Amino acid sequence: MRIVLISLMLALPWAAASANDPAVTVCDRLAAHPEDPDRVSAGRVTAEIDLPAAIAACEADLDHDPDNARLSYQLARVLFYAGEPERAMAEMLRAAEAGHRQAEFVYGVFVIRARPHAPTDPCIAERYWQRSARAGRDAAAVNYALQLLRGRFTTCEAPVARSELAAWLQSSLQAAPAGYAGYYQRLLIEDLLQRLAQT
């Protein structure tokens, strides 16, 4: 009896913690991006994705949870890979508007790279990258700094203060992988910090 009680007591904290975790859906298992900091399952690289199955799963999961920004982002991802840019752009914008930091970052990339059906105003990318960087997405911080120093946002109305941008880059530098895996990442960020200090 004592063993049973101890087992139950050990199980309770795990049960309480898992109740607060987001539910992992089929869409998550089939379409999560490996670099999405808010994924809830292991990510899949593009070559591993069964696109028709992933699209169907994400659409079905969104039918049950239509306000889930993570699922909208993952549906946008697989639609983009499947050659459906108009639907992909709409879902990516939906996820970005809902505050999904990976979607904010990627939507900004779509704008800067002039993807089909994306807006062409670089200030839109600036706005989403600012939001994403402030939410802790290092890729948004680094891309924002790079494009800012290239003069891409000179016509935009809400530039980031140099001190805030430097803080983003310092945080990204600390988060870069150790050793050779993060060598080029650290090199780029160090160069951006140096250029930023000279402007």
Image (spheres, rainbow, N blue to C red):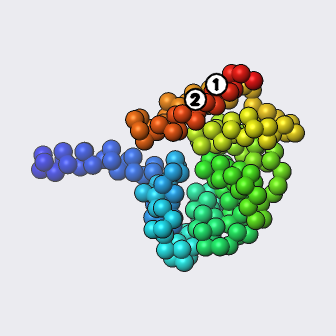
Instruction: Give coordinates of residue 32: x percent, y percent.
Output: 50, 60
In the picture, the quarter occupied by the C terminus is top right
Whole-percent x and y of residue 77? 60, 63
Q: Is residue 92 visible?
A: yes
Q: CA distance from mark 1 to mark 2?
A: 6 Å
Image vertical order of residue 160 relative to residue 15, above or below: above
Write the residue at 45% across / 64% down: 29
Q: Residues within 10 Å of mark 2 (few under 14, many from 20)?
A: some
Tell me the residue at 83%/51% (across/down): 121
Q: Is residue 120 left or right of residue 135?
A: right
Q: Residue at x 41, y 35 (%)?
A: 178
Q: Which mark is residue 194?
A: 1
Q: Residue at x 64, y 31 (%)?
A: 192
Left or right of residue 174, residue 131 in this image: right
Tell me, for residue 190, which label it has, or none.
2
Residues at badges 1 and 2 in contact (C-beta under 8 Å)?
yes
Kind of residue at badge 2: Glu
- Dot 2: what SS? helix
Which amino acid type is marked by label 1?
Gln
Position in image of residue 120 (x %, y %): 82, 55
Quarter assignment of residue 138: top right
Specify whether 58 is left or right of 180.
right
Relative depth, front residue between 30 and 174: 174
